[in-house]
Image (cartoon, helix red, strand yellow):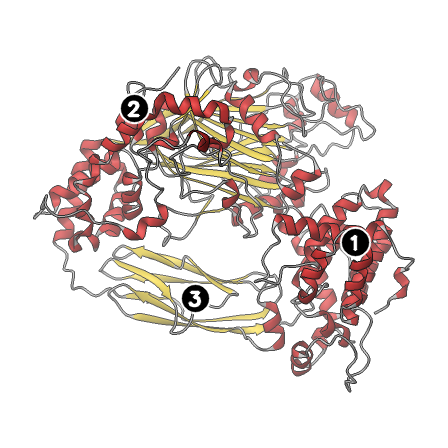
Amino acid sequence: MAITGDDVSLDQIVPVSRDFTLEEVSPDGELYILGSDVTVQLDTAELSLLFQLPFGSHTRTFLQEVARACPGFDPATPDPEFLWLSRYRCTELETEPPPPQSWNSVPGTWPGRARIGGGGSSSDELRPNGKGLPVDQSSWSQNKPENSLSRQNKSKSEITNMVRSSTITVSDKAHILSMQKFGLRDTIVKSHLIQKEEDYTYIQNFRFFVGTYNVNGQSPKECLRPWLSHDTQAPDVYCVGFQELDLSKEAFFFHDTPKEEEWFKAVSESLHPDAKYAKVKLIRLVGIMLLLYVKQEHAAYISEVEAETVGTGIMGRMGNKGGVAIRFQFHSTSICVVNSHLAAHTEEYERRNQDYKDICSRMQFCQVDPSLPPLTISKHDVILWLGDLNYRIEEPDVEKVKKLIEEKAFQTLYAYDQLRAQVAAKAVFEGFSEGELTFQPTYKYDTGSDDWDTSEKCRAPAWCDRVLWKGKNITQLSYQSHMALKTSDHKPVSSVFDIGVRVINEELYRKTLEEIVRSLDKMENANIPSVSLSKREFCFQNVKYMHLQVESFTIRNGQVPCQFEFISKPNEESYCKQWLRASPSRGFLLPDSAIEIELELFVNKTTATKLNSGEDKIEDILVLHLDRGKDYFLSVSGNYMPSCFGSPIHTLCYMKEPILDLPLETIRELTLMQLQTEDNGSQLEKPMDIPKELWILVDYLYRNAIQQEDLFQQPGLRLEFDHIRDCLDTGTIDNLSASNHSVAEALLLFLESLPEPVICYSAYRNCLECSGNLTASKQVITTLPACHRNVFTYLMAFLQELLKNSAKNHLDDNILASIFGSLLLRNPAGHQKLEMAEKKKAQEFVHQFLTHPEPLSLLSYSA
């Protein structure tokens, strides 16, 4: 079934956004890719970058009406080149066919076509920003090369012609944007249009299918149509989420898995047979994957597609737990779909609550206009949240739970549901709704059956797999599990919604736009904007390591629309110091409107050392600039509480008292003291073998957690980290009381915060070169300064003790080598994360010390 010009109209193709890949999925699951041909021309998308307006007929109408509203239109005026948009452009289509072999030169890339968004493979989109490691595959990588060539030949000529003709749609009006009269108004026009949106839009219902399935690391073994196509009516939109796609160590540590392709194919083949669908986006974080499809006829009205990930595993970044999300604009309604896998185990409901809050706070989507602040989940009209939320049933008697299920007394059982209790306490999902649970718990079953768990652990049944929503004009039509699927120890869940989407009435839109433009004609451009600030001085008291403090103030505008922005001071790269952030840092205000600005102060490993040493202080001046107006100056001050986190190893070895008991001048001198390879005859007292803070953490774990399951793999609680940090910094170790997981995570954070890693930067290359050669590796360790050498040896002894108890704690040498390899060995080039090849060498370097232990006792060192 080839796609021709008759199958997809020009209007459907032109507005597709740069991240959107249009794939037609036939009922037999075969994929026909259009996106690579039609989205390399970004005329409409580029204009949307300027106007920040939805794509499609809305944008075209906007341009046409602006042309009418701006007299003096000269057809001879050359089109502006928009050079600043070059980073969004893809390379032009080749007019000559490529050599026959070139289709195979780069896996997953078609000849003569650039990848949407500027080129590069999916690995280009990995972001080392604390949000986990997203794997966002475009549709090219989903197709076998031998199939790609034939499909290309089928439709290339028709689609190339469409692309060429599509450039005529807007190019003869694009020069309007270079006119000064309009350039001063675009933001005002957009803001007024948003305010008056109800005047020119109407609500139209679309059918959404939302599904979640924890597949327990299995490959697809059965058709998914009983889950994905159980309704007689074909959905307009599919949102399909998976958890535990791959449970292998390779997927966890190196983020690669063949199961992504397997489950993508299984879903594509099981979509409703009565419609043809386009894949909008696929996003994956380790085993958490989310797929978004729309009916082909709706593709033209999907825009501003962005996807992000947040890892909430150990150290707040590992992707074994966390969330992935896709946001997009459907007509004039913004929609965000979130798929999450929260912390496991019945007693860990507080950890689940924290995971939810982390996902909400850290999931941020770039806007098309890079000058605008990122969007959070809450900044959308419709939010659909699905996944293995892992909330359990509190009733301790498993047999009683099973009896209530057998009696179908689901409402009685629901009274014991943890998620119900946490939502009622407003701890999570505030403002969200969930349908009535009329199906039996979806976890835990014996794989391949409908029998409850008969393993040694005999897990109690629970409604782990859920779908919630937030927004207006949403009606849930069904909410159910699908017992027919038996691949996993979970059952898949689906929910079908009718969602009211705002659709533009073009005639009303034109009239509204004309009114706005006419009203702007009456404004005097010479008016100078002026604002008032509710506060200009901010004092942050007793700032602590990794403890967020927030101060806020209000900007209230006068009678003239204004654009504001925090700007850099002379000779400075950023508008503020690294430990400070203004949110939002720029924006637009209509007359008599106001906005609240939050100043967020957060000290992390990057900024702690200079604050400890006194080289930096909690002092800064912010400059708030008004476009065509004056500047306002804001003063930030405060005091930082020095911490062992962010202090060098040799500094801590000389600190025999808790850091907060020492004078600031002493802390400064010790922090700035140069690291010596050997004793240079210093007049200082003999240092301790290892930092006392490291000894406290390791000793606690040695005494309490040597047999703890999932140690260094399950994150702790943030409040407990604050308590641990305070105990270490004040020396009140008798008060140290925290979960084993929190102490383990604190140890990893301590090692990560060291300004000079355990294996010094100077030895980094030598370590990688001799990984696999134990004798040479030992020789490198002997060249380290005594305190660093002692810490390395001490940590290896502790990890060897853990491995002796692997039957209970389920740790192995590969897991420990991978976790500690990236902490003990760090790339000196800008302290960047290790490349994959270097990461494996670092892992191998540590691994050889774990598998060839030296006869050493943890008691050999003391603080």
Assess whether mark 1 and mark 2 are in contact (beta carbons under 8 angstroms).
Answer: no
Three-letter code for the amino acid on which mark 1 is drawn: Asn
Expressed as whole percent of the image width and height from the top left, the position of residue 97 reads 35, 30
Three-letter code for the amino acid on which mark 3 is drawn: Ser
Q: CA distance from mark 1 to mark 3?
A: 45 Å
Q: Specify the label residue 229 is tagged with.
A: none
Q: CA distance from mark 2 to mark 1?
A: 59 Å
Expressed as whole percent of the image width and height from the top left, the position of residue 286 reads 61, 39
Q: Is residue 517 left or right of residue 619?
A: left
Q: Nearer the viewer, mark 1 or mark 3?
A: 1
Expressed as whole percent of the image width and height from the top left, the position of residue 49 reads 31, 46
Expressed as whole percent of the image width and height from the top left, the position of residue 553 reads 41, 63
Q: Quadrant of the N terminus?
A: top left
Three-letter code for the amino acid on which mark 2 is drawn: Glu
Q: Specify the label residue 773 is tagged with.
A: 1
347 to 396, vertically: above or below: below
805 to 660, vertically: above or below: above
Of pointers 2 and 3, the one earlier in the residue sequence: 2
**What residue does disc 3 label?**
574
Q: Could you classify mark 3 by the number of other residues whose Cα lies within 10 Å: few (under 14), some (14-19), or many (20 or more)?
A: few
Q: Nearer the viewer, mark 2 or mark 1?
A: 1
Which residue ends up furthest to the bottom in the rendered image?
Answer: 683
Q: Nearer the viewer, residue 4 or 326?
A: 4
Tag 2's secondary structure? helix
Assess whether mark 3 and mark 1 are in contact (beta carbons under 8 angstroms).
Answer: no
Q: Which residue: 25% across, 62% down?
A: 558
Q: Is residue 422 left or right of residue 188?
A: right
Q: Is residue 486 left or right of residue 146?
A: right
Q: Specify the label residue 158 is tagged with.
A: 2
Tag 3's secondary structure? loop
Q: Nearer the viewer, residue 375 or 367?
A: 367
